[in-house]
Image (cartoon, helix red, strand yellow):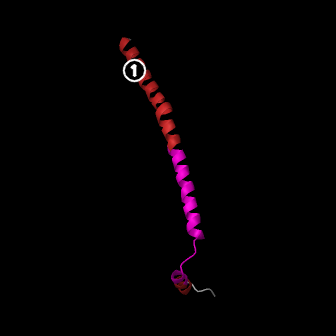
């Protein structure tokens, strides 16, 4: 009886500690990572937008049109 009771209390303590760790450490860290990832995606979109709007130098334009002539 005493052994069973001590195992049950130990199990409860370990489970409670694990839950507290998840709630108070991992979840805020996950939120921080998610916010950082969203910021990175926004910067990446802006960079792609800048790259797509950049004009090609004349040497690259002639090479690009020679490689892909329009009908």
User: Is 58 covered by the magenta stretch?
Assistant: yes
User: Is residue 34 positioned above or below 6 on the image?
Assistant: below
Location of residue 20 in the rendering, given as x and y in whole percent from the top left corner: 47, 28
Name the outermost residue toward the left: 3
Location of residue 13 in the rendering, given as x and y in whole percent from the top left corner: 42, 22
Extent of the magenta region: 33-61
Residue pointed to by mark 1: 10
Closer-to-camera residue (40/7) = 40
Q: Residue at 55% across / 55% down in the picture?
A: 41
Name the outermost residue toward the right: 71
Instruction: Give the number of marks.
Output: 1
Please state, as top left, top right, bottom left or bottom right, where the N terminus lies in the image: top left
Q: Please state if 63 lies on the left or on the right of 8 as rendered.
A: right
- In which image quadrant can residue 4 be found? top left
Q: Residues within 10 Å of mark 1 (few under 14, many from 20)?
A: few
By secondary structure, the bulk of the magenta-drawn segment is best described as: helix
- In which image quadrant can residue 52 be found? bottom right
Q: Please state if 14 lies on the left or on the right of 28 as rendered.
A: left
Q: Residue at 52% across / 53% down in the picture?
A: 40
User: Is residue 66 positioned above or below 11 on the image?
Assistant: below
Please state, as top left, top right, bottom left or bottom right, where the C terminus lies in the image: bottom right
Q: Residue at 55% across / 62% down in the picture?
A: 47
- SS under mark 1: helix
Location of residue 7 in the rendering, given as x and y in whole percent from the top left corner: 38, 19
User: Is residue 1 positioned above or below 42 on the image?
Assistant: above
Q: Residue at 50% across / 31% down in the picture?
A: 23
């Amino acid at each position: 009886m005493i052994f069973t009771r001590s195992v049950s209390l130990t199990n409860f303590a370990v489970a409670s500690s694990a839950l507290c760790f998840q709630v108070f450490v991992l979840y805020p860290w996950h939120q921080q990572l998610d916010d950082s990832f969203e910021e990175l995606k926004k910067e990446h979109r802006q960079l792609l937008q800048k790259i797509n709007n950049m004009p090609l130098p004349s040497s690259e334009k002639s090479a690009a049109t020679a490689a892909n002539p329009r009908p």
